[in-house]
Image (cartoon, grey):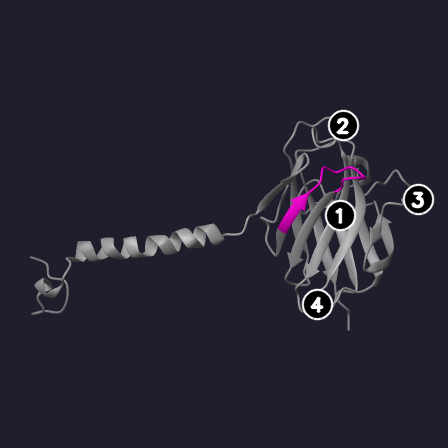
Amino acid sequence: MRTYGPSGFSSTRFFLSPGRVCQALVLALFPLASVAARAEPQRVWVAGAYSFSDELGGFRITSASGIGTKEDPLVITEELNSATPVTLTIRTTKPIHPFGTAGQFANGLMYMRVDVLNNSGQAWVEFQFELQEILHRPSVFGDGLSFDQRNKTPDNIWSSSFADFDRDFEPYDRLLFKSGKIDPLKTAKFDYLITDYTPRWTFYLVQDPRIPSS
């Protein structure tokens, strides 16, 4: 017969058998596992005809609201814990219908407001957004996805922390905010319009906070 413990040590000294001990440990740890599961942060938020996910890591979404019109933009609230690029995953949750009713269809017009909390411990002196239809691959001029590239004089691009911006459409779709600063533990707001005239089910928004180079 197998004994549990050093030679000469009787297992009858346990109040519970080894099997019962394991069972008791599982029951004792189960409430802790349930608490941990409940504490797991939400990684997908739904607003309008889209879902927004921080599944690729490096940041945390804390809320999402709106339907994507100029009067009721999609508002994504985030917390970034470092000064390195992070990627927001955007998926359609409603049928795709170009120029359909916002909120009921993914219509290719997304008025956005991104509220970003700087929890990196470093001041950011620029902030760049980049659109990608395919992850890690530049979104080229002809794919229909851009920061409103057809509008040469946009009046809907704004930030609470930066005075100027630049847009690039080839070979990337990028929007760079500059001439400003976001100090640690401060929040900045960014407004812009994303247009996608050939809507896809999934695309990506890379967010890149910049720190001083020296």
| Residue hosting label 2 | 98
Query: Which quarter of the image is occupied by the C terminus?
Result: bottom right
Residue at 23% in and 53% down: 23
- Using the numbered discs, state the Cα–Cα distance from disc 3 to disc 4 in whole angstroms: 32 Å
Mark 4 and mark 2 lie on one chain; the one further toward the N terminus is 2
Instruction: Give the amino acid at mark 2.
Output: Pro
| Residue hosting label 3 | 153
Instruction: Give the amino acid at mark 3.
Output: Thr
Q: Give the residue at the far front of this rendering.
A: 71
Mark 3 and mark 4 lie on one chain; the one further toward the N terminus is 3
Mark 3 and mark 1 lie on one chain; the one further toward the N terminus is 1
Residue at 9% in and 69% down: 9
Query: For the residue labelled by badge 2, is the local secondary structure a helix, a strand or a loop?
Result: loop
Residues rendered magenta in the picture: 62-73
| Residue hosting label 4 | 184
Q: What is the quadrant of residue 209 in the picture?
A: bottom right
Q: Give the residue at the far bottom of this rendering.
A: 214
